[in-house]
Amino acid sequence: MISMEHCSERLEVSTGALDKSGPAPGERGASFYPQRLRDAKATCLTPDDFPVCADGVADDAEALQQAINRAQAASGFGIVFVPEGRYRLGKTVHVWAGIRLVSPSPYGVKIASCHDLEFRGVHVYSPTKLSFDNTLHDVTSGAEVRSREIAKLIISGRPPEARLPKARSAHLSPVLAPGARVERVAGGFEFIDGVTADRAGNVYFVDGRWHRIYRWSPDSQTLTLVCDTPIGPLALAFDQAGHLLITARTDNFTCTVFALDPGGDASELQALPAVPASACECTVAILPGHRWRDAHDFLAAATRPSDAVFVSPDGTTFIPKSDDLRRAFLLRAAVPGLPFYLADEFGQKTWVFEVSADGTLSKPQLFAEKGELDVAVDAVGNVYVAAGEIFVYTPAGELIDTIAVPERPATLVFGGPEGKTLFITARSSLYSVGVRYPGRVQVPGRARARISSR
């Protein structure tokens, strides 16, 4: 993150005291690594190897660049550990493609006591999960800018004018239940996403850093750890019999799919082999709800048929194999006859497609000029787009409401006994808000018996 305090550019990095096993829900840590790890392949930005001061006065840009270059030269990818300190960057630091942050920052640019600043043509070339919550934070006024696409923004330095509250009163909302407010129901996570719900309305989500899958039960208002395994879970879905399907990224950056009985032994993960698509007789396709395509081939990738699929244990549901699975943190059912909404994360837009019998998407149309990680649809066809806040559109693409969330929303799902609660995963917390309409039934045969949850 770049902090411009009184317009002097600085990079601030701090570490905290997280236990190696990760924080428990309710305990928010400041850093992933409390001390230098014994990783022979990692590059450490220390005075022993680089001309770094970390005092906030000397320019550490060249030292940081050398560390990044060394990690790149060693293997084409790697980890750079940055110890606690204040790092002043006096010039541009070039980060190689594929570099990822271990912990996202709350903001990209932080300003204080600044005036007459002008930002033009801002675009975030980074996946939402791995960058920051707010593009800009003004410490002096407390103002935040969450938009990741900015044509022109001027910071005058004058006190902000009085304005109406950020969120409209709930009783005026065309989609929120009367009197409903966004509430935090669980917290203390690193970055939760991959959300899905079972037929009883229980909500499942992933805290990817710690390789954990949780279940929130609206009836009992309890949080349960479902799975804590070595696999790196990315996103979740259910088949018709109630098996939890888990996409996971392996050490060689490929993706595989596992199945788990959420009411059984969490250690009994079943790896699902990929089979030829031509041999698949399943009826329900599960696709990524967003795609990150920095090669500018979003539509081509979204409509490309797959020649292999992962089939669920009950034989009803399949996930087409694709490179995008290893970068997808959200899965959604694609049902023929229903529009499928897909977020273009790189382009920050939302598209709508038709769905064929084999789950292939076709006939793309631009739906909204906002898009990021997830899109949810209610029973009357209203479309909820998570992109800084939650923007609600009619089926025709008319913006009718904006739901303000304390943290940047990541993924969305309708849950609860009647499906009339919208659950929102964000950086550190799970939020919920009552809505007028339940979620759209995505999967045929939804009323069939399911595996019971403990």
Image (spheres, grey):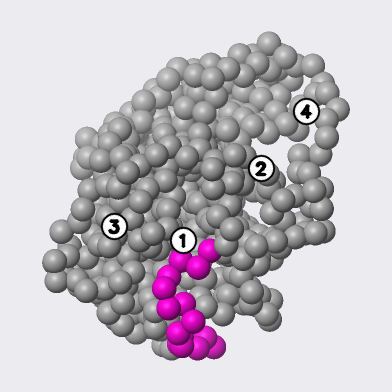
The disc, 3 or 4, on the residue closer to the chain's N-terminal end is 4
Marks 3/1: CA distance? 24 Å
Q: Disc 3 residue type? A: Ser
Q: Are marks 1 and 4 in contact (CB under 8 Å)?
A: no
Q: Disc 1 residue type? A: Gly
Q: Can residue 386 be seen in this view?
A: no
Front residue of this view, candidates 396 and 286? 396
Q: In this view, does 28 lie to the left or right of 245?
A: right
Q: What percent of the width, then of the height, locates residue 124?
A: 46, 31
Front residue of this view, candidates 293 and 74? 293
Element at label 4? loop
**In the image as oriented, which residue stretches furthest toward the right?**
162
Q: In this view, does 187 lie above or below 53?
A: below
Q: Disc 2 residue type? A: Ile
Q: Which range of residues does the magenta coloring cover?
A: 440-454
Q: What percent of the width, then of the height, locates residue 234?
A: 39, 60
Element at label 3? loop
Q: Name the residue under label 3.
A: 356
Element at label 2? strand
Q: In this view, does 292 lie above or below 420?
A: above
Q: Disc 4 residue type? A: Ser
Q: Name the residue under label 2.
A: 400
Which corner quadrant holds the C terminus?
bottom right
Q: Do the residues labelled 3 and 4 touch (CB within 8 Å)?
A: no
Q: Residue 141 carries which label?
A: 4
Q: Name the residue under label 1.
A: 194
Q: In this view, does 159 lie to the left or right of 248?
A: right
Q: What percent of the width, then of the height, locates residue 317?
A: 32, 72
Q: Is residue 279 magenta?
A: no
Mark closer to the observer (4, 2) = 2
